[in-house]
Amino acid sequence: MSQAAGKNERLYVSWAEYHRLIETLALRVYESGYAFDSLLCLARGGLRVGDVISRIFERPLAILATSSYREAAGTQRGALDIATHITTTGGDLHGRLLLVDDLVDTGTTLARVVELLRSRFHQLTEVRTAVIWYKAVSSFRPDYHVVYLPHSPWIQQPFEEYDTLRPPQLAARLQAYGRVD
């Protein structure tokens, strides 16, 4: 990860680093001995994290869509929206749950989702949370994290390029690469 200094500090993450961080998170959960029965990721940021952990631990992935960073190409926080339904092929959430996301910023999303899960899914006996990045400004402390950030930079994740990429630009880029049809 590379870091830019200054008022608008950003933490730039490459695809290789991003994947290594997800793998490190999976290993931390494994080494803790936490044997979870259900796995839930928060979409969109936690989709890739959840997918990898689902594959490594051989658990079905449940998905709950949440959204608060919609404005200014996903860089400005707005009101938190939490989907009404969870999508899964693994049956109802039950037992010990691992809830994953990419980061905990203010802590609002994770706190509200954990509260919602505990009130709606009485079959859950325990809920633990796992994120890649944990910012000190957060009011919520995750159970597992890889990187603790004592400050609050914008984390420039590698997939964010798609927030401003539109089909005509994509077509031009693929043509420049020698697109394979």
Image (cartoon, helix red, strand yellow):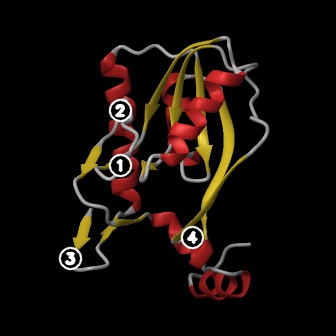
- Residue 162 lies, in percent from the top left, at 59, 72
Amino acid on which disc 3 is placed: Ala
Amino acid on which disc 2 is placed: Tyr
Tell me which label, 4 or 1, sits earlier in the chain. 4
At horizontal 58% and vertical 78% (from top left) the residue drawn is 72
Tell me which label, 3 or 4, sits earlier in the chain. 3
Query: Answer yes or no: do the residues labelled 3 and 2 have beta carbons within 8 Å?
Result: no
Tell me which label, 2 or 4, sits earlier in the chain. 4
Amino acid on which disc 4 is placed: Gly
Q: Is residue 67 above or below residue 89?
A: below
**Tag 3 residue:** 5
Query: Answer yes or no: do the residues labelled 2 and 4 have beta carbons within 8 Å?
Result: no
At horizontal 68% and vertical 20% (from top left) the residue drawn is 93
**Tag 2 residue:** 144
Q: Residues within 10 Å of mark 2 (few under 14, many from 20)?
A: many
**Tag 4 residue:** 74
Secondary structure of residue under mark 2: loop
Secondary structure of residue under mark 3: loop
Disc number for residue 133: 1
C-alpha distance separating marks 4 and 1: 17 Å
Of the pair 99 and 169, the residue shown nearer to us: 99
Secondary structure of residue under mark 4: helix
At horizontal 74% and vertical 72% (from top left) the residue drawn is 181
C-alpha distance separating marks 2 and 4: 25 Å
- Residue 109 lies, in percent from the top left, at 54, 46
C-alpha distance separating marks 3 and 4: 21 Å
At horizontal 33% and vertical 55% (from top left) the residue drawn is 17
Q: Is residue 15 above or below residue 139?
A: below
Q: Residues within 10 Å of mark 3 (few under 14, many from 20)?
A: few
